[in-house]
Image: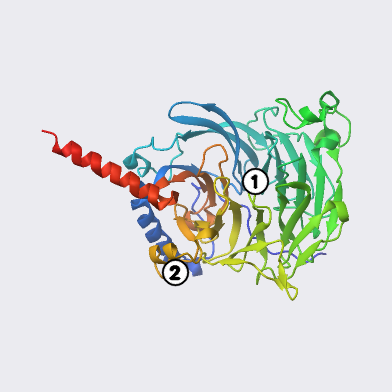
Amino acid sequence: MEPQQGPKKRGRKPKPKEDKKDEPHQPKMKDSKRTQHHVDDKYTQWKSLVPVLYDWLANHNLVWPSLSCRWGPQLEQSTFKNRQRLYLSEQTDGSVPNTLVIANCEVVKPRVAAADHISQFNEEARSPFVKKYKTIIHPGEVNRIRELPQNTKIVATHTDSPDILVWDVEAQPNRHAVLGANNSRPDLILTGHQDNAEFALAMCPTEPYVLSGGKDKSVVLWSIQDHIASSTTDPSKSAGSGGSIIKQNPEGNDKTSDGPTVGPRGIYYGHEDTVEDVAFCPTSAQEFCSVGDDSCLILWDARVGSSPVVKVEKAHNADLHCVDWNPHEDNFILTGSADNSVRMFDRRNLTSNGIGSPIHKFEGHKAAVLCVQWSPDKSSVFGSSAEDGLLNIWDYEKVGKKVEQGARSPSAPAGLFFQHAGHRDKVVDFHWNSSDPWTIVSVSDDCDTTGGGGTLQIWRMSDLIYRPEDEVIAELEKFKSHVVSCSAKP
């Protein structure tokens, strides 16, 4: 009999938000009240500053927590707002099925929302800007969602199994999630892991490739191209066509009721513990990296074999949870860890005496970092979210600059220029919107603080925060002159 494993770091069976009875662990009540009091104080302070800090913010209460959130394709543009797909999930306690949710989101354009309006939201209400469009009954919990950049209607999901599930969300039927309902059938199943693959998942920006890592300590690479329909064999149409890029197999082929399968292009070994996250090089489908619970960052190149190209020992002082490769400058890689820090590596100089040698260390979180992502809007900017409930926005170009030293308080971490404190529990995922500059969707798992459920927030900081200082001063002077001239009129 195998020894019982400890709980997963980033997922467990939750309670719905309304159900707050029968709370366990009564002896911890005093400590939890103290922690909650601190969180509530910080949250109250944050909410009072919302009209100053944000151009727009929408708060959406989730009955069930979602461990992932991703932007899908933009559907429509109008004068004051754009409509866009949003992917999230419902991680349930088993009383109803786990689901992959496709929502429509109204993204308000910059300088449209009134300052007093965006701060007046009800934490227990659903946002009018987020409407559920379609439900897919997912076989197991949805731990991670990633969209295919060449066709964002195609998404892959990780669950508590060795398989990766691929969905054409537009072709999938809308389902009613009730107890006993059959699972939706994936459009494609990617096989190759020998143990559960729960969190490490990436889609390639240049080819329809999928990358995964798991408890079997391996990194696995697939090509969806290996399963393209014969009617779309033209390479110029396969990935970016308006229709599905998933081959529709007749019933009875492959795994019959489960869905068609495709095997890996390659399996890569080099980690000594669970692989927690993976990322593709933005300029090459053959190069990628991975991080794991062995505290290692590994770079791979599929063209030179299945062994590591570079293995960075002790990239952090604890488990690594997340990694991202800069889409603007492909020498820079971010990692986030259980040691509460984010580190930035230059792949031209990764180690010193065999030990990880980051070019920057960002230490602004008070708990494990769960997600890091570079901004699509500025090459030096990135975000990091953590179990402390914060989503920090950093700019590595600000580190060490005299302007920054004079502007920030002595205790502020180097490079940190914005802190989103709207969540009251661990921020498990976030995603920059490539269609709407400086717009972010973030999600928190609120089971520990509010008794269940989660919170989805869509927000955009004020452009006065990130624009160049001379631009901001010029605009303020222009505004000041306008006010003076108006007040001088009889």
Indicate the position of residue 430 as horizontal and vertical percent values.
Answer: 57, 49
Marks 2 and 1, Cα distance to the nearest angstrom? Answer: 30 Å
Do we see residue 142 in this rendering?
no
Residue 213 appears in which quarter of the rendering? bottom right
How many C-alpha atoms fall within 10 Å of the one at disc 1: few (<14), some, or many (≥20)? Answer: few
Secondary structure at badge 2 equals helix
Query: Is 101 above or below relative to 443?
Result: above
Please give the residue where the numbered disc 1 appears in the rendered image: 94
Q: Amino acid at mark 1?
A: Gly
Query: Is 466 above or below relative to 89?
Result: below
Residue lying furthest left: 490
Question: Does residue 485 appear left or right of residue 34 in this picture?
Answer: left
Indicate the position of residue 207 as horizontal and vertical percent values.
Answer: 76, 40
Q: Amino acid at mark 2?
A: Lys
Point 74% across, 38% down: residue: 166
Point 58% across, 67% down: residue: 361
**Reading the chain from its start, which is encountered first: label 2 or label 1?**
2
Point 67% across, 66% down: residue: 319
Please give the residue where the numbered disc 2 appears in the rendered image: 30
Indicate the position of residue 187 as horizontal and vertical percent values.
Answer: 77, 33
